[in-house]
Amino acid sequence: MDPLKEELARLEEELDHVMTELPEVALQVPVAELHMRNVHIEISPDATIRAAIDLMVEHNVGCLAAITDGKLAGILSERDILRKVAPDFDDTGTRTVSEIMTADPGVLPSGSTVADAIRVMHEGHYRHLPIIDEDRVVEAVVSVRNILEYVVDHFPSEVLNLPPHPVDRKPMATPEGA
């Protein structure tokens, strides 16, 4: 056999081996290593919903950690506002965050992996997940966007080379090309 073809076959086999192991290894990375903003925006559960909306807009975030005595009391998300406030939007200046926040939300302990975050987010239908220490102090908030950015960063060719609509893809009626 041609030495060049042998080397190419060996490299292809090695690449196949790496690609089958890479996803599991990549998912065992601690969530803290994701490219998250190092800040999470906090608000008191006693603050008005209007103040919360203003804070979310100011910081361009989709959720706020509701903090009481330095510990996580709940989380307020865009979804909470849309579902629970939109019909009575005029009341945002008098209603409080505690009325609509998700109290005792799903959380991840420090040191959790990307796989843990994906599992908890999927099972709880969460878009944002606070990362807390043993005293329920919020260290960060991981979002679906953080997870997606991580996946794209680590599997760019697999993600970026997908067809525009992989689910709706139909075979071409006539072949194209030269």
Image: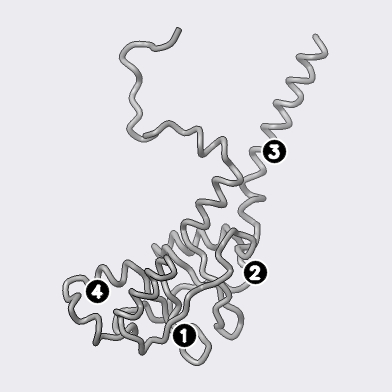
Mark sitting on residue 84 = 4
Residue 94 is left or right of residue 34, and the answer is left
Of residues 117 and 175, the one nearer the viewer is 175
Q: In the rendering, at what x and y percent does residue 165 appear? A: 37, 34
Q: Distance from label 2 to label 3 (Cα)?
A: 25 Å
Identify the residue at the far right of this view. 3
Q: How far is mark 1 from mark 4, CA to CA? A: 20 Å
> Of tags 2 and 1, which is closer to the observer?
1
Residue 137 picture quarter: bottom right
Q: Which mark is residue 41?
A: none
> Residue 130, relative to residue 159: is it above or below?
below
Amino acid of disc 4: Lys
Q: Secondary structure at mark 1?
A: strand
Is mark 1 in CB contact (under 8 Å) with mark 4?
no
Q: Where residue 111 is drawn, which disc sits there?
A: 2
The total of numbered circles placed on residues is 4
What residue is pinned by disc 1? Answer: 67
Give me the residue at 59% from left, 46% from top: 153
Mark 2 or mark 4, which has the lower sequence index? 4
The residue that mark 3 highlights is 18
